[in-house]
Structures are given as C-alpha cells and as structure tokens.
C-alpha cells in the first residue's frame, strides 16, 4: 500500500466512524414509538356515557375526550338564548317579508327562542337543508315555521333539543371529578346549535360563551379542542369556528394532515401525508368486526390517527350502543396497546403539532450525548412530552437519561441502523444528557 492510499483509507475510516448512526436522534411519529394512534371521543354528554361507558374505560385505563353541551349543565353561566331584537318584532316582520338571504340567519337564530314547541324540528330541518346547499328550501322551511307561529298552530312553551335532554343528570362536579381522573372535556357549543345557519352574534355566543364556561369550571387545558355539532365541515361554520379553538375535531387545517371525516368513504391507506385523521363513527349499523378492522388498519399504516366517535350508550342518545359492545371493542384496542398509542384527542393533536414544529440538535462530547429539543409553539398550550429515538454506541449496555431533575435508565434496543433508546423528553426545557451506565 502506498502512502496516498494509506491516508485515503485512514480518512475513509474516520468518515465511516462519523457517518454511523451513533448520536443521531429523531422524534418518533407517535408517543413511545408506537405504530399508530387512536383517540376515543364521545359527543353530546349523554348521561349514560358516564354511567356505563366511562367505568369500562376506567377499568381498562383508556383515555377519552367528551364533547359536552355546556348550556344545559346546572351552574353554567351561559344558557341557550337569542341575541338580538325582540322576537315579536321578527315574528311580525315575517308576515310581510319572506325569508331571504339577508334575514335567514336572524330568523334561524331566533327559531328556538320564539316560545313555541315544535319549532326545533323546523329549525333542524331548515338547517340540514342549508348545510346541504339547498338554501331556497331552507328559507321555505323557515317561512313555514314562522307562519305556523303567526297563525297559532304551534303550542306555546319551550323545549330542549334531544341532545340537551340526554345530558340531564350531568353536573360540573361530576365533570371535575372525571377530569381529575384524567378524562378530557371540550365544548360541543351551548345548545348543540347548527352553527352554519346562525347570525354572527349568535355564533359567537354559542362558541365563545361555551368556551368561557368550560374555562371557568375546568381551566385553560380544556379549551384546546371543540366539536361543532353534527360533525359539519360547512364553510361558513368553519370560517367562524376555526379561529376560536386551536383544534376542531370537525376539521384540522394543518397542511401535513389529511382529514377523512366520519361521513367519508375514502380509504386512509392511500395518503402520503405525514398524518391522517381517520374519523370513524360507531353506530347501530356498524359491526364489531368492522370496528376492529379500523384498529387493524391504524396499526398497518404508520400515519393513521384513528379518531372514534361515539354518541348514545345503553338506551340513551343518538346511535345507541350497548356498553357490553364497547367493552369488547375497547378490550381489543387495549390488547394492541403495544402498537397503538391511545391518547385523548387533545394530547394526540398536540403531539403531532409539537413534532411538526420541533427541531432536535445533538452533540457528542466525550462519553456523553447531549440532545436539545425545541418547538416553536406556545409552551403554555403545547406542553406534552415527545418521544425521542437516539442511537447510542454499541458498547453502551445501559443508558442514563437525564433532563433537568428527571432521570431514568434504559437498555438499548437494536434495529438495522444500530443500537438505540426510545425515551420521552420535554421540549423547550434543559438539554437531555445521555451517558453510558455500564
Ligand atoms: Zn352532537
């Protein structure tokens, strides 16, 4: 070997040494390096969710997010009401001015507060037509309601929506207790409103004041997400709702995420986005086998976040399921917890956002590896740990991991790139120091 090739070989060996994975760190797609994620959510706060489904989840130690209708809970500061001029004025005006594009939202906002029973059904039908893009039919339906009010064919009185009635028995004290046990709560508006058909004053009342009641009873942590009723993605409803909450289950607009809402038939396996929110609703028509297959699909594609939506439980609510079925299904999810991260909606959404806004810097100094983890989001809101995967030297048989006052010890695992450790770290805190512990 001549001198030149000796130096070349030497140089190559140095390069190879630097080039191995040693010290390389990545943020795993999901917490604890799991292959997929699942969030269990419940809508409408139907009391049987807490009486019969929550104990099952507690036994299996599964998290969940409950979207509750705040106006019907005793002690809420903000109850359902119409924000606007006296309804008598509106009723009188309908005698001469047919419903049009200019007055539709005001009439729809007032519809539930005219003081007549049976009005809810017209409000719902009209809103459904509007959300389906049938605006002329929606206006006609509104005219029909107001003409019935004027000619006295509706009975005087007030009525709750079905969803509000199902919540009867739910109290802030019980919600606080469940929250203290780790369950996530979030707004489903004040009255289970059709946000798309309200005027802006009433939209903001339903959104902002429900948020305020949740914040005052439970705290800042519980105003991160919300679900606008009826699972809608209607442009007008989203235009006003998206700025009020950091993360709507209806629609997340993060550029790295594909959304497959629960009404869609799109298969999630085909997306090349970093994350897919795959929302599926368990209904009376859904077989247990199909529900299990969603879990299998989430495990088979690493970008899938399966968001399950449940409503009624044990005879009460929309699309009622027996708790025994949920029990069997949740056991199936629990059985796969080694591969699936089970997290409430807020934690899962925060993890993805933190990871997509984070950077990792690694330095090797002597016998230690130093890792810095930062994200650029508001640390008061985005405060959950991220999982790091760091490759360590082959001779490290045990590793001490230290960040600020927290210390843990781990045995490295091996993949095709080398030996690594998986550990949770807090972003925007002190440097993480890894040293060999033998
Ligand atoms: Zn609902």
Image (cartoon, rainbow, N blue to C red):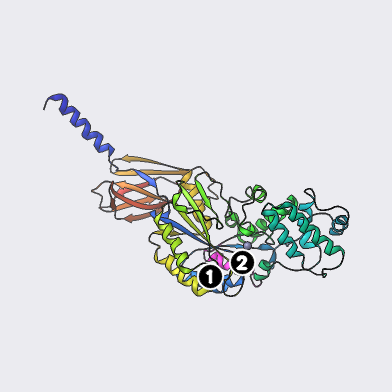
| Left or right of residue 135: residue 404 | left
Q: Is residue 227 magenta?
A: no
Quarter of the image where one finds residue 120: bottom right
Residue drawn at x 47%, y 65% is 290
Given residues 163 and 100, the one toward you in this image is 100
Q: Position of residue 23 (x, y in %)?
A: 32, 43
Residue at which label 2 appears: 45
| Left or right of residue 334: residue 192 | right
Q: Residues within 10 Å of mark 2 (few under 14, many from 20)?
A: many
| Left or right of residue 366: residue 290 | right
Given residues 92 and 432, the one toward you in this image is 92
Quarter of the image where one finds residue 362: top left
Residue at which label 1 appears: 54
Q: Upstream in the sequence, badge 2 or badge 1? A: 2
- Asked whether the viewer can see residue 50, the reply is yes
Mark 1 within 8 Å of ligand 1, using the beta carbon: no
Start-end of magenta stretch = 168-184
Q: Position of residue 7 (x, y in %)?
A: 18, 27
């Amino acid at each position: 070997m001549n001198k030149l090739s000796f130096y070349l070989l030497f140089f190559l060996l140095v390069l190879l040494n630097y080039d191995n994975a040693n010290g390389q760190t990545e943020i795993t797609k999901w917490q604890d390096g799991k292959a997929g994620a699942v969030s269990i959510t419940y809508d409408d706060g139907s009391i049987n969710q807490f009486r019969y489904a929550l104990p099952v989840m507690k036994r299996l130690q599964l998290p969940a997010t409950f979207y509750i209708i705040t106006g019907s809970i005793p002690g809420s500061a903000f109850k359902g009401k119409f924000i606007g001029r006296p309804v008598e004025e509106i009723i009188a005006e309908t005698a001469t001015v047919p419903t049009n594009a200019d007055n539709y939202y005001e009439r729809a906002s007032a519809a539930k507060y005219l003081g007549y029973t049976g009005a809810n059904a017209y409000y719902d039908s009209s809103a459904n037509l509007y959300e389906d893009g049938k605006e002329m039919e929606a206006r006609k339906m509104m005219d029909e309601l107001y003409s019935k009010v004027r000619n006295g064919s509706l009975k005087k009185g007030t009525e709750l929506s079905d969803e509000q009635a199902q919540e009867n028995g739910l109290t802030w004290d019980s919600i606080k207790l469940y929250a203290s046990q780790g369950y996530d709560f979030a707004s489903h508006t004040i009255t289970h409103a059709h946000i798309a058909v309200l005027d802006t004053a009433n939209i903001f009342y339903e959104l902002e004041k429900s948020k305020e009641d949740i914040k005052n009873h439970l705290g800042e942590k519980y105003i991160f997400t919300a679900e606008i009723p009826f699972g809608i993605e209607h442009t007008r409803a989203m235009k006003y709702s998206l700025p009020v909450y950091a993360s709507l289950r209806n629609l997340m607009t993060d550029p790295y995420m594909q959304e497959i809402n629960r009404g869609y038939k799109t298969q999630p396996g085909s997306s090349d986005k970093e994350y897919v929110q795959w929302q599926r609703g368990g209904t009376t028509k859904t077989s247990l086998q199909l529900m299990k297959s969603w879990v299998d699909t989430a495990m088979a594609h690493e970008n899938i976040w399966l968001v399950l939506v449940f409503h009624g439980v044990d005879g009460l609510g929309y699309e009622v399921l027996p708790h025994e079925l949920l029990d069997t299904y949740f056991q199936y999810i629990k059985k796969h917890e080694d591969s699936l991260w089970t997290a409430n909606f807020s934690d899962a959404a925060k993890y993805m956002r933190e990871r997509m806004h984070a950077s990792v810097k690694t330095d090797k100094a002597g016998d230690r590896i130093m890792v810095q983890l930062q994200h650029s989001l508001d640390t008061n809101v985005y405060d959950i740990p991220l999982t790091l995967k760091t490759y360590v030297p082959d001779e490290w048989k045990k590793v001490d991991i230290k960040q600020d006052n927290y210390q843990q010890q781990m045995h490295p695992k091996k993949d095709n790139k080398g030996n690594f450790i998986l550990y949770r770290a807090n972003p925007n805190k002190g440097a993480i120091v890894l040293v060999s512990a033998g």
